[in-house]
């Protein structure tokens, strides 16, 4: 007998991973160039040259034990302070290294944050939908309940709907901007309105409602970068990753930053430390802690993603597909040509198009297309998208 919940999670992988693995098998069968795999957010733009240069510098100038040995549980002090200094200088927030915890990417950051915050079984985390499906797993593992709240027609925040979802069990609102899967970037006024509403709700509560911000796409904006959440709401925790901004998805490096302005910041950070210990998320990869510290503020080639977005968006709209133009990240959220998104994806697969149905994102009737792929993949896929659309007009 094993942990049944864990066994179920292992046997029923996320739909994104399931399609990704199918794509790998299919490419081996018929050739990579014949499969149009838009399943997973795996960056195609290479890391900035600064990353390669920094890695070479570290590998040739530092002793191995400083690159491959254990760091402190929360990370190297000089790296934590470098992250804090970057936040102070760029966003004007009085961040301190003592409140930065280096992690194995944003997933570990979120898991540790939920475990630190959720004090009682059944406490609730509100999230605007659509949302990244693994949020449900992370919150449930911490003993909480994820409460989806629909966004508006353009996938922006519905402040009234969030306010209506708040209960005595609410511990936090979880935001992801730029958003996976829609590409929406929440405007400064949206965040200020949310902050104002939360501050009103906090009056009379024993504990404030926290704002947890999942920010791996922050640097991938096609307009202005969104306002930093700590600058508008004191009870904020930022979970960040260098997976997308520096194209280091496989290196699993990120951090948690607890706002020094939040209530009980030091105690919250101690809870994060404890959660990291309990979950085994101690000592993030030392080499890449050092590497990202030397490249803060660098971003992979955003122009490549913009060109992919424009090419795919304009082509699909011209074929009759409906979607809202993404403001950031590298996903296109497209309305399915039939109500059942899974059935639509199954038909797309007949044309070797691998798309992700929206049901596990908290909304039906859409598909997510990850356009962080090679340009030739997008160009090669357009006849298949056209054939798919035509199959619904017969």
Image (cartoon, helix red, strand yellow):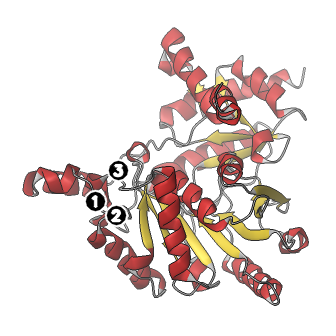
Q: Position of residue 206 (x, y in %)?
A: 77, 83
Location of the N terminus by quadrant is top right
Q: Position of residue 149 (x, y in %)?
A: 84, 60
**In terms of sequence position, does the residue under pointer 1 or pointer 3 come before the other?**
3
- The residue where tag 2 is placed is 75
* Callout 3 crowding tier (Cα within 10 Å): few <14, some 14–19, many ≥20: some
The mark found on residue 71 in the picture is: 1
Name the residue rendered at 66%, 46% in the picture. 134
Q: Is residue 264 visible?
A: yes
In-image side of 282 versus 376 (left or right):
left
Q: Is residue 242 left or right of residue 72?
A: right
The numbered dot on residue 256 is: none
Helix, strand or loop under label 1: loop
Say which quadrant the C terminus sits in: top right
Residue 47, labelled with which disc?
3
SS at badge 2: loop
The front one of 38 and 266 is 266
Spatial CA span between label 2 and label 3: 22 Å
Residue 373: x %, y % from top left: 51, 38
Select label 2 or label 3 by which is in front: 2
Marks 1,2: beta carbons within 8 A: yes
């Amino acid at each position: 007998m094993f942990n049944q919940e864990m066994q179920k999670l292992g046997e029923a992988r996320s739909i994104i991973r399931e399609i990704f693995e199918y794509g790998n098998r299919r490419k081996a069968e018929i050739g990579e160039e014949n499969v149009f795999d838009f399943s997973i957010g795996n960056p195609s733009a290479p890391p900035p040259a600064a990353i390669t240069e920094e890695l070479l510098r570290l590998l040739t100038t530092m002793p191995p034990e400083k690159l491959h040995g254990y760091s402190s549980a929360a990370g190297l002090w000089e790296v934590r302070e470098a992250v804090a200094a970057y936040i102070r200088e760029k966003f004007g927030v009085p961040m301190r290294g003592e409140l930065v915890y280096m992690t194995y990417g944003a997933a570990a950051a979120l898991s540790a944050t939920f475990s630190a915050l959720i004090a009682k079984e059944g406490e609730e985390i509100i999230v605007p939908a659509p949302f990244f499906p693994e949020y449900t797993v992370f919150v449930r593992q911490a003993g909480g309940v994820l409460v989806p709240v629909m966004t508006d027609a353009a996938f922006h925040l519905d402040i009234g709907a969030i306010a209506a979802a708040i209960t005595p069990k609410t511990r936090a609102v979880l935001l992801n901007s730029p958003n996976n899967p829609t590409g929406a970037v929440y405007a400064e006024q949206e965040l200020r309105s949310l902050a104002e509403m939360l501050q009103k709700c906090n009056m009379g509560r024993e504990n404030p409602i926290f704002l947890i911000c999942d920010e791996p796409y922050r640097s991938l904006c096609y307009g202005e970068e969104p306002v930093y959440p700590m600058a508008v709401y004191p009870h904020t925790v930022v979970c960040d990753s260098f997976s997308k901004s520096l194209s280091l998805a496989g290196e699993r490096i990120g951090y948690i930053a607890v706002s020094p302005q939040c209530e009980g910041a030091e105690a919250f950070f101690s809870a994060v430390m404890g959660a990291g210990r309990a979950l085994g998320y101690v000592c993030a990869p030392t080499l890449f802690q050092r590497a990202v510290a030397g490249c803060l503020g660098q971003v992979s080639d955003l122009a490549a993603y913009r060109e992919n977005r424009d090419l795919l968006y304009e082509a699909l709209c011209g074929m009759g597909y409906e979607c809202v133009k993404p403001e950031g990240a590298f996903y296109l959220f497209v309305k399915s040509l039939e109500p059942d998104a899974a059935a639509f994806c199954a038909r797309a697969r007949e044309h070797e198009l691998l798309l992700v149905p929206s049901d596990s994102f908290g909304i039906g009737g859409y598909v997510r297309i990850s356009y962080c792929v090679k340009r030739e993949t997008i160009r090669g896929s357009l006849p298949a998208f056209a054939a798919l659309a035509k199959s619904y007009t017969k």
